[in-house]
Image (cartoon, rainbow, N blue to C red):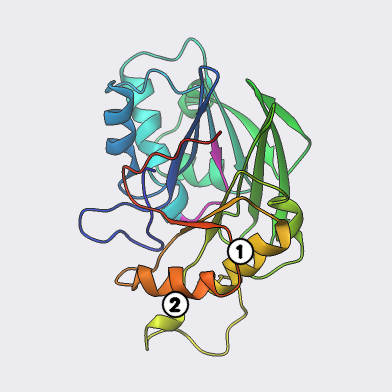
Amino acid sequence: MLGSCGAWPEPGRACSGYVLEHAGFRIVIDLGYGTLARLLQHLGSTSADGVDAVVITHKHPDHMLDLHGLFRARWFSGRTDTPIAVYAAEGVRERLIGLEEDDDGAIDQVFAWHRLPGKRYQLGPFRLDSWVLPHFVPNAGVRFTADDLTVAYTGDTGPDPALAELGRDADLFIVEATDRHQHETAPAGRPRLHLTARDAGEAASAAGARRLMLSHFWPDNDRQLSREAASHVFDGQILLADEGLTVALD
């Protein structure tokens, strides 16, 4: 776990970011505010050696802004001979290019781009499938399958029947649980394009997932309250995303 917050990070935390490792292959999933330093610490490399692929669910900065830092780590360290494969939703590449004052193609030298949601991809030992999920911008729910291991992740989404298919029988289903209703400042009357923890529990239950990880908590949320809400509708193990947490899947 690189980061667990939505929108902006709480002190000492970071926004959405995860590392998935299996059979010697390492995938980074989302790189929101504050995740890059944690990733580099995990890798033991200031130039981000050891990243095999990156998956970015959508272009909101709390899910992709530190991808620009990863670009700089690779570009200025001269690690451009083999571009890192990036699987990203519409608008991510364009937003990244917009962060450079005078992009001369450097971003496309560091990263090799593939569009999500899209066709099935093979990432090392993993098969990557993706779904369109409802959000304010194009968002891809992603599912990684290798041998008898399945990890699924929603990115940001409102309630949708596709969540049950995305997380079907997953060993770990990472679901956003923004729970904005915990705060009086939550906007009223807008479309439901985020989930509550109860929504997340219902999605995991419908999917038959083994484990549910709640993530993307709005800053200052009561995370235990979110866990309790999910537990009313999901009987499996419920984890709370926490920076530095490692989950062994077997």
* Outermost residue, top side: 81
Where 113 sits versus 238, above or below? Answer: above
**Secondary structure beneath disc 2?**
helix
Horizontal arrangement in the rendering, residue 90 relative to residue 69 (left or right): right
* Outermost residue, left side: 11
Q: Position of residue 191 (x, y in %)?
A: 62, 80
Q: Position of residue 113 (x, y in %)?
A: 61, 30
Residue 148 among those drawn in magenta: no
> In which quadrant is the N terminus drawn?
top left
Is residue 63 visible from the viewing direction of this image?
yes
Q: Residue at x 43, y 45 (%)?
A: 17
Mark 1 burial class by Cα count in 10 Å: few <14, some 14-19, many 20+:
many
Query: Where does label 1 land, which residue?
Result: 157
Q: Position of residue 125 (x, y in %)?
A: 64, 21
Q: Badges 1 and 2: C-beta atoms under 8 Å apart?
A: no
- Main SS of residues in magenta: loop
Magenta residues (range): 55-60
Is residue 196 visible from the viewing direction of this image?
no
Q: Residue at x 29, y 20 (%)?
A: 45
Point out which mark residue 101 bears. Answer: none
Q: Residue at x 40, y 30 (%)?
A: 71
Q: Position of residue 188 (x, y in %)?
A: 51, 89
